[in-house]
Image (tube, rainbow, N blue to C red):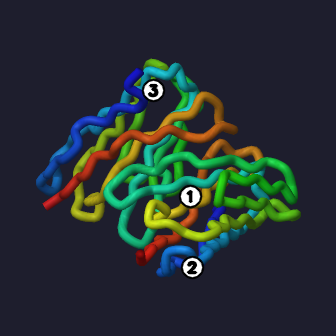
Amino acid sequence: NAGVTQTPKFQVLKTGQSMTLQCAQDMNHEYMSWYRQDPGMGLRLIHYSVGAGITDQGEVPNGYNVSRSTTEDFPLRLLSAAPSQTSVYFCASSLQGALGYTFGSGTRLTVV
Amino acid sequence: GQQVMQIPQYQHVQEGEDFTTYCNSSTTLSNIQWYKQRPGGHPVFLIQLVKSGEVKKQKRLTFQFGEAKKNSSLHITATQTTDVGTYFCAGKGGATNKLIFGTGTLLAVQP
């Protein structure tokens, strides 16, 4: 039981490049979310999903896309990277929305 | 939109002193969750409160949910160096499925 797995752990992108941050969980959790963490700003919700085929926007969705084709996977796509997207990205999952979330170990992204 | 604020942003205590962080939401919450993040780590779920006025304890940690379900607090008795980290509250407002995190309180404990 690996929990929530995020890849890669570190990534450097050039402005304008696109990439996908991977997130997978093996706990059969329905709910999955993406957060970004910036110094002094806590965790901000980017996108979330309450089940396969269902996604919705969070607090800061611009510049990011998500899809949820399976229960296990919830990839986050950066369409055209910008320096403002330099951050630590966390994926999290929960069995039900009313239960605590399990977080992955994060992806540290730098956009130059 | 829903906003969740925490105070203080930073707290430095001597080992053995007590510590409290406060969480305030702009909207009524259906539940409140608390997480701890060690430096360089990821958030780890501590507890969830659901009922108005609810109080829960975990060893030296006491969690409270306000009567109006718009505020919460975490109190640590006799802090230890292992308590170092950032404590976040997170809540869902009304019928939304969005879990919104507070700004966090960084706790430093001096031995």
Between A68 and A11, which is closer to the camera in this rendering? A11
Q: Position of residue A7 (x, y in %)?
A: 26, 35
Q: Which numbered disc covers residue A61? A: none
Foreground: A61 or B91?
Answer: B91
Whether labels 3 and 1 belong to a single chain: the reply is no
Element carrying mark 2: loop
In this rendering, which labeled residue sits more in front, label 2 or label 3?
A: 2
List the residue tagged with mark 2.
B8
**Secondary structure of the residue carrying numbered label 1:** strand
Q: CA distance from mark 3 to mark 1?
A: 23 Å
| Left or right of B79, for residue B85 | left
Q: Amino acid at mark 2?
A: Pro
Image marks 3 and 1: residues in contact by CB distance under 8 Å: no
What separation in Å lies between label 1 and label 2 (alpha carbons)? 15 Å
Q: x, y (%) of residue A61? A: 44, 51
Q: Give the vertical position of A55 relative to B85 (above or below).
A: above
Q: Earlier in the sequence, mark 1 or mark 2?
A: 2
Tag 3 residue: A68
The kind of residue tagged 3 is Arg
The residue where tag 1 is placed is B101
Q: Residue at x 67, y 51 (%)?
A: B58
Please name the residue shown 33% across and 46% down the image: A106
